[in-house]
Amino acid sequence: MRMLQHVLLLLLAALCSRKSEALSQPSPLTTTPSSSINDLPNLKAAIIVPGFLTGASEFQPLVDALNARGIPTIAVPFPNWHWIPCLGGRSMKPMLERIDHTVRHLTASGGDVNAVPDFEYSIQDCIGDFRDNPGGVLEVGGSAEVDLYPDVTPRGRFPVPFEDAKGRVALIGHSAGGWIARAYLSDRSYGGKVYNGKEMIHSLVTLGSPHGNAPGAAFKGVEWVNREAVPSNVRALAVSGSGYRGDSSGQLTQNAYSFCCNKGTDGTGYDGDGLTPIHSALAMEGAETLVLDGRVTHFPWSEVFGGDIFAPDLAKIHKEEKAPWYGSDFALDQWVGWLEQLRY
């Protein structure tokens, strides 16, 4: 968290010298595996895509729980401050590069989660990306529309795997990580690059992800992914928690539900996980849907640094009632079986 605060201070100065030209850094491997997708076996391995302003460390308990259940799992290896260039509803290409790095190494290793290397990314890289990353409320690069983003390559030194994919793995996206994972599956150009992750992904699970269209720059990416259904060769499950009403779970919940809904709604009439209303969490075309039994919240608020400040009402409920979240055994027992149904 201190690192996050330090980088934010440095970025204030960087805003004054924003560049408009695209970067000239080399991008990681962009070719798709040479094998046909029909020839690639399903690998019993999964990658967690952390939600907005969270990183791999916050999801280590879920990684451990899935590994203990026999599903080799890794979280995309980055800390929470790597989200800074994406603030204000800007391009998620920096996150897509991190997902691509993890997917390519995991599939090239045949599903060995220990074979995914770290990558290099400095504070200076972050400042540069914050200046150049397009879109958002400031319309960096000229527009907030995804299709009009200039082709800007995010900074970072991502090692390229020496082999093509040996199989296909699962993606598990939490919160914003879910709709970003959908962008990764697409064969359309996102900010000048086609990721076409559907060739290396057999299943997608989203946990409390805002899939519904809503006003504002933050939802331009959601609108972009909603122009198509989940690819037919990828199984998908949209999961939602419930039991946190917008009119009785604190101001953050009411505001979050209003943010995720059509213009003119105040959020009080919705139910959800405390951050994402049910209807938005399930609005992924082409996916199966699941509303978890019991009261399940978005995040283990009382167990993370700053959770009681960012979400005081939800943190209090989580602590006093020992409320489960998507990564708790109570919730895992309900959704992880869907992943295990696949024949490996």
Image (spheres, rainbow, N blue to C red):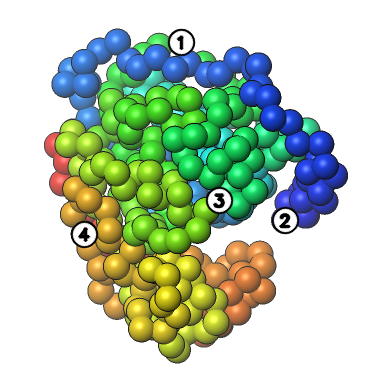
For mark 1, give the secondary structure.
loop
Q: Quadrant of the image for the N terminus?
A: bottom right
Real-space Cα separation, disc 2 to disc 1, in angstroms = 35 Å
Q: Dot 2 lies on which element?
A: loop
Q: Earlier in the sequence, mark 4 or mark 1?
A: 1
Specify whether residue 52 is in view.
yes
What amino acid type should be assigned to the residue bearing mark 1? Phe
Q: Which residue is mark 2?
A: 1
Between the residue at mark 3 and the residue at mark 4, the CA separation in whole angstroms equals: 26 Å
Q: Which residue is mark 3?
A: 89
Q: Could you say where residue 106 lies in the image, as x and y percent from the top left?
A: 41, 27
User: Which amino acid type is shown beneath numbered disc 3?
Assistant: Gly
Say what secondary structure mark 3 lies in: loop
> Which dot marks residue 196?
none
Q: Earlier in the sequence, mark 1 or mark 3?
A: 3
Q: In this rendering, would 4 be left or right of 146? A: right
Q: Nearer the viewer, mark 4 or mark 1?
A: 4
Q: Residue furthest bottom?
A: 248
N-term mark: 2 or 1? 2
Amino acid carrying mark 4 in the image: Thr
Mark 3 or mark 4: name the one nearer the start of the chain: 3
Q: Quadrant of residue 19?
A: top right
Q: Residues within 10 Å of mark 3 (few under 14, many from 20)?
A: many
Q: Is residue 162 left or right of residue 57?
A: left
Q: Residue at x 77, y 54 (%)?
A: 5
Residue at numbered disc 1:
162
Residue drawn at x 44%, y 35% as measured from the top left: 147
Q: Mark 2 or mark 3: which comes first in sequence?
A: 2
- The percent coordinates of residue 115 (x first, y second) are 47, 25
Which residue position holds label 4? Answer: 289
